[in-house]
Amino acid sequence: MTALSFDTSPYAASEKTPARPAVIDFFSGCGGTSAGLRAAGMRIAAAVDLDAAAAATYRKNFPDSEFYEVDIRKLDHNAFDHLVTSDSPLVFSACAPCQPYSSMRHSGSKSRPQERSLLLTLIPFMDRLKPDALIVENVPGLQKIPGGSTWNRFLRYLERSGYSTRWEVIDCRAYGVPQRRKRLVLLASRHGTIDFPEETHGKDLLPYSTVRDWIGDLPAIQAGETYSGDPIHRSGALGDLNLRRIMAITEGGSRSEWPSELWLDCHRKSKGHQDSYGRMRYDDTAPVLTTKCTDITNGRYGHPTQNRAISAREAALLQTFPKDFKFLGGLKSMTRQIGNAVPVLVSKAMGQHIIEHLQTSKIENCG
C-alpha cells in the first residue's frame, strides 16, 4: 500500500449540490488544516498566521486563497467582510497557539501554570461574521486547566451565541493517521446538534495505518542526501559517531542495542528517554512527530531500515500531507512547519462531516 491520494478536484455547485463552504483558517501554519478541508470539498477563502516561513509555504500551496501574515490581535475585525456571501456557508478553523503549562509563576514552594492562548481572539470575528460552523484543534490538557480557563470561557461564549458544540480528545489513528498522536478537537454549529464523524480505523474497523503504508515506496537516500526528484525528500547529515549509532540499531529498536563504546555519559546515568536515537518500525504506527522529528537525537525518528533520520518528505507523509505538497525553507524550518501542523486526514474527516451536517440541516430546515 502506498501513500494515500487526495481528491482536490473542484466541488462544483449545482442545483443538487450546495455551494462549497468557504473557510477562513486562523493560525493556519503551513496549511495542514486547510489541505484537509480542501480535500473534503471546501473552498479555502483566507488564512491568517504570523510565522513568515509557514506563510511562504502556505502561499505556495494555496495560491488562490488570501493570506494575512499578521498578528491576529492587530487585524481589523472587518478584514474578511468581502469574503462572505449569502449563498455559501462560512466555516472558521483555528489551531490557536497555546502553551498552557510552559510559563510557571512561583509562589513560595508551589508553582502554578499560567495559560497563554490566542483562542479568545476569534470572538470579535465570530461576532461580526457569525460562521455557520467552527473547527478548533489544540493540545490535550487545555480543557483541564481549572476555573475560568480560556477553554471554558470560549465554550461559554459559543453557548451564549447559539452554537451547538461537541469536543473530544481524539486518537488521530482512528482517522487513518499513521501516528500515535492525540489532539483536542472542538466542532461547533449554528444549525443544530453536531456530533463527531465516525472513526474509520481501529478495533473492528480498518487496521491502523502504518509507517510502511505512507513512506514504504519512497526512494532510498543516505544521511545528508536530497533525492533529485523531490527536494523535500531530504535527510539531515550524521557525524561518524551518530552514523555508527544508528547502524547498530535494528528496525524498531533503541539505543539499548548499542555496544558500550557508543553510549553517552548521560545515558549511563539514566535509563530514561529510550526513544532518542531509536528507529521506527515499518508495520506499526509512528511516534508523535514534533518540530524536531528529522533529528535522531530528539526521539524515535530513525528510518526503519535506512541509516538516517526520516526525511522532511517522510515526516510530511506521516502527517498525511499529499505527496505533492511543497514546503519552503531549510530542513529545520520545514521540519518545524510539519511538526506544528494538524494531520491532514484529521481535518479532512472533520470537514467532510461538517459538509454533511450543513447539508442535512438545510434539508431539515426547509422541511
Image (spheres, helix red, strand yellow):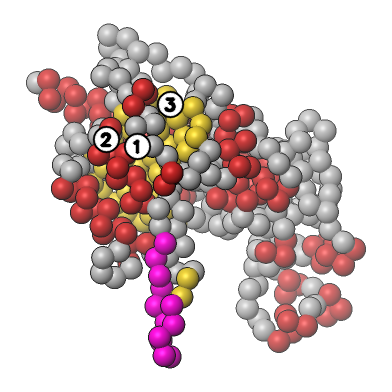
Tell me the number on the disc at residue 128. Answer: 2
Secondary structure state at the residue bearing disc 3: strand
Q: In this view, does 341 lie above or below 46?
A: below
Residue situated in front as seen by the camera: 234 or 60: 60
Q: Which residue lies furthest to the left in this view?
A: 367
The span picked out in magenta is: 105-116
Secondary structure state at the residue bearing disc 2: helix
Q: Nearer the viewer, mark 3 or mark 2?
A: 2
Quadrant position of residue 225:
top right
Q: Kindly identify which residue carries mark 3.
A: 45
Q: Nearer the viewer, mark 1 or mark 3?
A: 1
- Point out residue 108 in the picture as x, y percentages from the top left corner: 41, 90
Q: Which residue is drawn at 32% across and 59% down?
A: 150
Tell me the number on the disc at residue 188. Answer: none
Q: State the count of labels.
A: 3
Q: Distance between the residues labelled 2 and 1?
A: 7 Å
Q: Distance between the residues labelled 3 and 2?
A: 17 Å
Q: Residue at x 47, y 50 (%)?
A: 173
Q: Is residue 186 above or below residue 321?
A: below
- Point out residue 66 in the picture as x, y percentages from the top left corner: 49, 27
